[in-house]
Image (cartoon, helix red, strand yellow):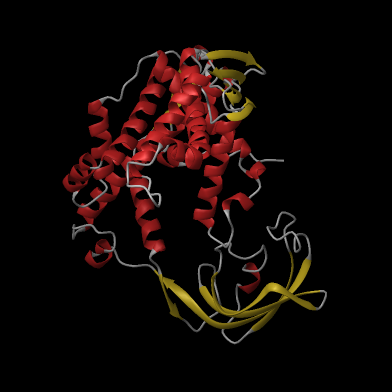
Amino acid sequence: MQVSVENTSALERRMTIGVPAERIEIEVNKRLQQTARKAKIPGFRPGKVPMSVIRQRYEDGARQEALGDLIQATFYEAVVEQKLNPAGAPSVEPKTFEKGKDLEYIATFEVFPEFTVAGFESISVERLSADVADSDLDNMLEILRKQNVSFEVVDRAAQNEDQLNIDFVGKIGGEAFAGGSATGTQLVLGSGRMIPGFEDGLVGAKAGEERVLNLTFPEDYQNLELAGKTAEFTVTVNTVSAPTLPELNETFFKQFGIKETNIEGFRTEVRKNMERELRQAIKSKVKNQVMDGLLAANPIEVPKALLENEVNRLRVQAVQQFGGNIKPDQLPAELFEEQAKRRVELGLIVAEVVKQFDLKPDDTRVRELIQEMASAYQEPEQVVAWYYKNEQQMNEVRSVVLEEQVVDTVLQKASVTDKAVSYEEAVKPVEAPQAD
């Protein structure tokens, strides 16, 4: 087998492969002999059909099959021989494809980039530390109560946090517009569910009252046809209901699947959940800074095949998340290219760190992570046992631990600053940069 390789770009390779005719004929004959053993042809007993008849009937198909298998086999042999690492399937272009002659074809493909991860010392990380104070716990209990609020109809003027049952009709230039009207809808004043001014305009209204609100849609409103336009809403208030927060009692505790029947036990369980959330938030923020630093310090070229695969994966995820009667390939690729590029780059960089430092998942950390996740359930021992019986889930946990070990490896050389903050600041999500 003859092989020559041409570098057509930083990652693209054009490989010409020649396969001797003798090897082709050996493979064709193998297939014909297999066919002869089971072929059923009128006038001949099974297994007794002359090879000349078999060749006449089946040689073309056997040759096509042999050529296809040989291309796959010889491509693999060639990349191993040339020590190449393809990043996707090749595009194959036959040069000679004639019976009795050597097979020659060209395989064009991309390879994984070769690089060494560096620049750990240039990465700066701010590592937060915080505790769950009693005041943080009190605030969380109030949030839980508000999430389970009930409403009772009252005979008074509406206030913020009241729930109103309303009918409304919206018009622009005297004409009703799509989505601008509703009947019997429930609206909590101060929730920010409606456009600015709508909820404020109903404060003080009573059941049976009609109010006319002249409002302007925000310039960045999601429906571009309405953005920046002025509309008139005629709103009829059907009922006004006041909020009632639930008592912190056994009935309330049971809603959260907690066995505790007293407030002290409930506070203990909530605190455990908050501390777990705090640890995860701090770990996530450190990881994001490390990954951003690795990307900035190690610019690499991404194989198009990997980028395309990741775009398609994100398309499928988007359809699964948002639903609708749409196929993944109907979503524009450019919507996902930036995110896909970041994912592929990080995947390649993290894999190279693992290789450079010969990292392997730490079994102790794997078990600790499983126990941490299981602690959120009522029967943690059963959850731990389930993980250890499910190899796919175990591999996912090992991947997470290996990524944590990559972060730890970088932190040993990075510039790390510790900062004590409040619980609220520590768990607050990092705002994504706004696009133009």
Direction from residue 1 to residue 38 in the image, left or right: left
Residue 277 lies, in percent from the top left, at: 36, 42
Residue at 78% across, 60% down = 228
Q: How many discs mark residues in the rendered view?
A: 0
Extreme-bottom residue of the structure = 208
Residue 31 higher or lower than 330, as above or below = above
Residue 163 lies, in percent from the top left, at: 51, 73
Is residue 195 among the parts visible in the rendering?
yes
Residue 178 higher or lower than 357, as above or below = below
Residue 216 lies, in percent from the top left, at: 75, 64
Dividing the image into 4 quarters, which one contains the C terminus?
top right
Residue at 63% across, 50% down = 331
Is residue 411 among the parts visible in the rendering?
no
Direction from residue 5 to residue 26 in the image, left or right: left
**Corner quadrant of residue 6:** top right
Residue at 54% across, 50% down = 318
Direction from residue 199 to residue 247 in the image, left or right: left
Residue 79 lies, in percent from the top left, at: 50, 18
> Is residue 379 or residue 106 the one in the foreground?
106
Residue at 44% across, 28% down = 27
Residue 310 higher or lower than 77, as above or below = below
> Is residue 414 or residue 309 the one in the foreground?
309
> Is residue 29 or residue 182 the one in the foreground?
29
**Corner quadrant of residue 10:** top right
